[in-house]
Image (cartoon, rainbow, N blue to C red):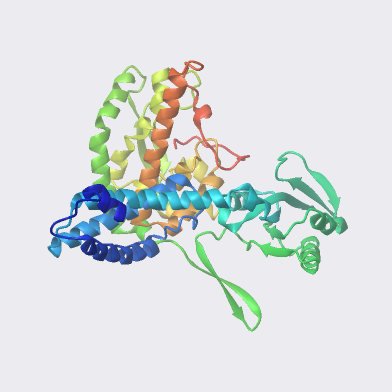
Amino acid sequence: MVAAYLLRYGFAKYDPQHGFLTYGTALLATMLLWVVIFAAAKIDGFRHGWYLPAVSSQLFLAVGLLMVVLFAAGYLLRIFLSRLTFTYFGVLLFLGFLGIRYFVHFILSSRLLRRAARRIVIVGTGPVAREMAAKIERHPEMLCKVVGFLSSADSSFDILPSAIPNKASKVRALEVVDLLRKQQVDEVIITVSQPGSPELMNLAARCRQDGIMVSVVPSPYELYLSKPQLVDIGGLPVLQLREGLANFANSGLKRTFDFVFSLFFFGFSVPFVIAGVIMLLGRRGGPFSRELRCGQNAMPFSMWRLNSDRECKDLPRRELILQQLSITELPQLWNVLRGEMSLVGPRPESLDRVKHYSDWQLQRLKVKPGITGLAQVHGLREQNSSEEKARFDLQYMMRSSFFLDISLLLQTVWTLVGRTAQLYKLTYSGTAREVPSNADLLEGTISNAHSTQSSAD
């Protein structure tokens, strides 16, 4: 506030009607409002892992809401302070909060603290183990480091160093704890589906005797749309699973949000769609195509898109650009207006793929499919499996809110701007004149996907 006041009036001047004490009173009100917004929007920076686009979009929305409330309160209370001063204040506030979070992330990720981080070994090598490793990596405030994976094999264990993804060695069960102690491991996290096997029970007991902490991911982990709560009943631990689907996901407010914003985006997208239609006029079947997809509650619907073949490897440069900038998916705004899709939600998949869903994957059909979603802003696209995307989709369904939907839309814009810059760089740089294929520009956050999908993400 001091910096904003000085930017507006300088050192020699001051507001003739309202001195700095008046701005100080406004600052106090701002601090109280920020506490409320901070708690309601849960924007502590590390709650859901460090991801710069997500942190930036959440801060942008929170500071924007704060400034709207301040301007509205000033107007209603007839306190007319300098709007330019408060504009400076809002910009500096956003940059300051973002700078604080980035500085903290930089410190937590520094080599000095990384050396002091707790060394962790994950028991298991499946999807849950990989996701656990990815989440630990995205939460630097935990001060933990995954140094390897263990996989049980009867009377022995396969140990896989995290830094060498394809090199495993076999260790006898009786030697595992000695090896963990030698590698200065502080904690073992068990992620396998049957943690009560004799080998794992023996491993856990010996680790605890040697001072190595043991943590267990509850099984079945597939009960994802639940908010667990551990209850102690006479010394017997009971894990209560409560319905975790956020009310906003299927509310009338979300439908209103989708309709209003899709109208706005529809008008904005018309020039881009027309340009795409002109490019595809000679295409067999016309410039538009309809694909049968599975919607909410497994109801099929026809999803619209521009008729550009995603499977073709020899597409013209202009069609590659249409696909990389997701212009081919803009006609799906019509599906949103019809109520078949939402702006934000799980991406719809084909009926054939849905037939192979597991019970917990079917939970993603409880809400309307979306044009974009949490999985998409984290880089999961065609080369990633339905299971990996379902984990992000179910996280979104548990956290769904008006604030989160706008944040994900902003992150989608961030992603598209990044793709545009990358396309421009690769197309017009002196070293690369050709637009890369789809696979060259896709970013995956979880490696070793065990299946692919044909849907447009």
At x 48% / y 54%, what residue is drawn?
A: 394
Residue 78, image quadrant: bottom left
Quadrant, the N terminus: bottom left
**Do we see residue 391 in this rendering?**
no
Residues 58 and 122: in front is 58
At x 51% / y 33%, what residue is drawn?
A: 442
**Do we see residue 73 in this rendering?**
yes
Quadrant, the C terminus: top left
- What residue occupies the far front of the structure in this picture? 12
Residues 275 and 169: in front is 169
Horizontal side, residue 111 vs residue 443: left or right = right
Horizontal side, residue 352 vs residue 408: left or right = right
Residue 381's spot in the image, x, y percent? 49, 38
- What residue occupies the far bottom of the structure in this picture? 234
Residue 146's spot in the image, x, y percent? 67, 51
Residue 26, image quadrant: bottom left
Can you say whether 84 is above or below 434 in the image? Answer: below
Q: How many marks?
A: 0
Horizontal side, residue 296 vs residue 236: left or right = left
Can you say whether 243 is above or below 299 in the image? Answer: below
Residue 356's spot in the image, x, y percent? 55, 46
Residue 411's spot in the image, x, y percent? 40, 43
Residues 25 and 95: in front is 25
Horizontal side, residue 55 vs residue 402: left or right = right
Residues 442 and 14: in front is 14
